[in-house]
Amino acid sequence: MYCLLKFASLFLAVSVCHGWLFGDFVGKQKDLDEISLWPQPQKFQSSAVAFKLSPVRFQIVHAKESSAGPNCSLLENAFRRYFEYMFGDMKKHEKSRKKVFDSDLVELKVWVTSADPECDGYPSLQTDESYELSVDGPSAVLKAANVWGALRGLETFSQLVYEDDYGVNNINKTVISDFPRFAHRGILLDSSRHFLPLKVILANLEAMAMNKFNVFHWHIVDDQSFPYMSRTFPELSQKGAFHPFTHVYTPSDVKMVIEFARMRGIRVIPEFDTPGHTQSWGNGITNLLTPCFSGSKPSGTFGPVNPILNSSYEFMAQFFKEISAVFPDAYIHLGGDEVDFNCWKSNPDVGKFMEQQGFGTDYSKLESFYIQRLLDIVAATNKGYMVWQEVFDNGVKLKADTQIHVWKERPQYQDEMAQVTAAGFSALLSTPWYLNRISYGQDWVNVYKADPQNFTGVCHSQIKIMWIYLDLCFCSSCCFYFVKSPKISRFGEKKTTQRLFTQYTIMLCMLELTSFKEKKSCEVC
Amino acid sequence: MYCLLKFASLFLAVSVCHGWLFGDFVGKQKDLDEISLWPQPQKFQSSAVAFKLSPVRFQIVHAKESSAGPNCSLLENAFRRYFEYMFGDMKKHEKSRKKVFDSDLVELKVWVTSADPECDGYPSLQTDESYELSVDGPSAVLKAANVWGALRGLETFSQLVYEDDYGVNNINKTVISDFPRFAHRGILLDSSRHFLPLKVILANLEAMAMNKFNVFHWHIVDDQSFPYMSRTFPELSQKGAFHPFTHVYTPSDVKMVIEFARMRGIRVIPEFDTPGHTQSWGNGITNLLTPCFSGSKPSGTFGPVNPILNSSYEFMAQFFKEISAVFPDAYIHLGGDEVDFNCWKSNPDVGKFMEQQGFGTDYSKLESFYIQRLLDIVAATNKGYMVWQEVFDNGVKLKDDTVVEVWIGNKMEEELQNVTGAGFTTILSAPWYLDYISYGQDWQKYYKVEPLNFPGTDAQKKLVIGGEACLWGEYVDATNLTPRLWPRASAVAERLWSDKSVTDISNAYNRLVQHRCRMVKRGIPAEPLFVGHCRHEYKGL
């Protein structure tokens, strides 16, 4: 019950702003114990009144007012998936119960309110994932601006359903209003160090949807193997995969991943990391990698992508042209981490180039030189890009909408977050969440305790975390100053965001409170 | 080549003793690279001469001289199992090739030499697991005293078989003479912290056989749940299991585990840990546990088994009578670890009893009092017993054939010295608590342990009869048990089977990578050691 009490105080704080009523917030502990929502919704109100759900009577349907209908295959699919989650285990009785009891819930109406439900669209960073859910007999109503919010609400609805002692599905009278704190909530999987069969990736997309994750960061290639089958450069996987037939992702595999993810409101952001982490690329593409030297002779080994050859950039231009067409998301992750300078240092041609360019012996300048040209190439494909933090640390000039991916433990990620955001870039945090680093015991606790905004923002400069506009007014005692940042203003011009700002009173309240907090904390600073 | 050179020196050293001839020990690197035996046999000699195995022609048969024949279902079963491991993936051609080529191996003859092959017996601590294997066209011969050695040899034979670039099974001309360094090579699984479905246990028995483990230490009950369904006291699981129907081992389940293990030469030693670790027992048996007191009143909570009541001992006598009948192995593990004295201290009746017995305030004397009586009860069932080290440390009088399990990492060498110094046999598990996971290749840590690396006489070292890899169940259930255990436990398998001198990490790495892929090919979702891939990847999810 600890949990609920915590909410109570939380909601109390909020209710002051929006006048929510919590009059019936008195539940029998026993009933409410059955419910375990994850992640916890922003606003949640439940009572002990329970309704029964019959597998032969209960239906998920489009609300009459909804802009989405039976043609919306994304929702039709989701309806069936969540029905299966809720009733899959139950034996279906052939004969329908004729009587509907007062204590039954017979349908969930899904009401998409926007003119365009986005049935055939892709989720994006700007996607509005908020929804409102009201459960009361005989009907429950799920209201969302578009299918993406509806997907999140369906997950929540299915989590509200619990089995009683007789194995009958029950749901309590509930009102939920929910939206994500952060817009980018991702899982990175690495299909290079080991090949991941398609079904493992798909199963994890399922699990992501169950946890309301919305980004699959596909670290698809690396030193060890190149399983991505490129149409433009088939030799990359032909020679760079562990096996050219059994250990590759064909174009149709990739399509299936993207579509499977889309059906669950998940963006697929591929990472093609360069100039380091590219050993496997070298197998297929001659002269792409820098030949390392041992004394005055080539040693036979290779280093990062060769930054001094025009052919490298020509290759990248063609390659990323394909990638930008294959992956529909607005962002591509370009990596840029952990570039080892030893090979460059050993190569006399690279040395000459350094001299010509006036880089002295600062190889991070050469790295930046490469990245700068790569970014320009990718920008020309009209994609945005994400990069690992080194690219920012090295002072590469970045587009304003670049997302900096903070992953290092040193310097402290809190400092890095402060620097990145102070420079006006959007930041994405992974440092505390390297789940491959296993340890004994309940390591989820520390994972849980990390807070991406737990750093000291710098006042009187442009600070933003792209997602902060969704932050709650009662969050940490940080001193954020973000509203006037060009990024957020630009968001504000877009329709979806306007909706977001106008549809919910809580958002308005939040803005007021935040601007108040802004003044206050800046004084403190 | 690195790998082979190591072998060469190993064999050289060995050959001095046994006069083995290594005349034809000249292999093409390419062929021998394919071979990755795990655990490494004691003596191994291989040449580059390769024979092909055809799935339609190759057979495993009883040798004419063998004392075992088609009636030996244990072997018949094993023949089919290993045939499946070797040829399962291959499409079977309906028509047999008519011609046998000189380069073919057409049969493996299994020759059991003892008058009694022990087909229907159970393996024991005294079992002779040695075998000799000779592979040469057109026949291979596997010679062993009994079925147990034959099982080990079949595993080795199947590991010698490798696929060439055309997917054809090959085997090189080979002579192997092998035996285990330690007689007790165990895996502990814990079915109390989480219930382990039968199929998870059976899958791990399969994996154990692939690694030549021979003891399944079944930590079947503990504080958290009592899944063992007792005929004598059905209320134990009725009230002590997580669920009385879905989370229990019925008598037939237990039988199946024992038989499945027997077919693979694996002993099943159940552990019923008392007097601590018994919270779940108290649900079904009233007055078995000590009532704890808060001041002068019972607090409603319970502590260890109540050592001051005769009823406790009467219960134990009946209970262990059943256990000794259900489990055929000569040993039962009686636990005896981590007894918390706080509850006993709080209980005024226990206090009086301590006074009467003249124990003063030394509660370890009370613990020993309980254990002593329990040991006598179990000894009366004609079973031997194993105990955790605390029982020895507390000075309980033990039967000569007691096996003391050393599990506390701190001062492990000293403990081994003391236990063996007192003349008791011991097994080591302290360095092999595989439930303690960490990032990276922790198998190397397990691999580097030398069990006899403690000060003591040769006679003392002989008393170390083996060890166990323990996977306690706090964070393990059916979802993650198998990949968490394998191939990390394989490191322990080689340490306990192979010669003391087999310690080269990079050689082990190369073999273990392939051994892990072999387990994966056989359907065991063993986790990877590091980056890479398997020719036959895991097909499950």
Image (cartoon, coloured by chain):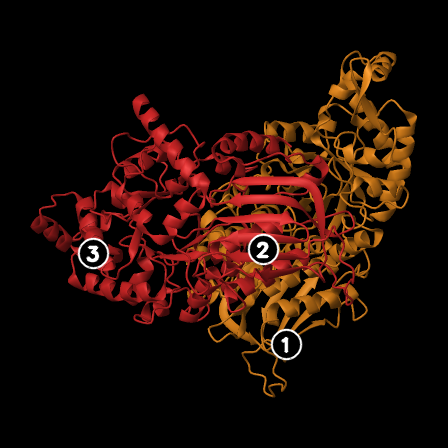
Chain colours: A red, B orange
Residue A187: which disc?
none
A513 vs B484, left or right, is left
Given the image, on which type of amino acid does mark 3 rest?
Answer: Asp
Residue identified by numbered label 1:
B58
- Kindly tell me whether residue B482 is visible in this rendering: no
Figure quadrant of the N terminus of chain B: bottom left
Measured as percent of width and height from the top left, residue B466 is found at 66, 42
Mark 3 belongs to chain:
A
Q: CA distance from mark 1 to mark 3?
A: 63 Å
* Count of all numbered marks drawn on residues in the image: 3
| CB atoms of marks 3 and 2 within 8 Å | no
Determine whether the residue tagged by mark 3 lies in a helix, strand or loop: helix
Residue identified by numbered label 3:
A376
Residue B41: which disc?
2
Q: CA distance from mark 1 to mark 2?
A: 24 Å
| In the image, residue B417 above or below residue A121 | above
Given the image, on which type of amino acid does mark 2 rest?
Answer: Pro
Q: Residue at x 30, y 22 (%)?
A: A523
Q: Residue at x 16, y 60 (%)?
A: A309
Measured as percent of width and height from the top left, residue B537 is found at 52, 63
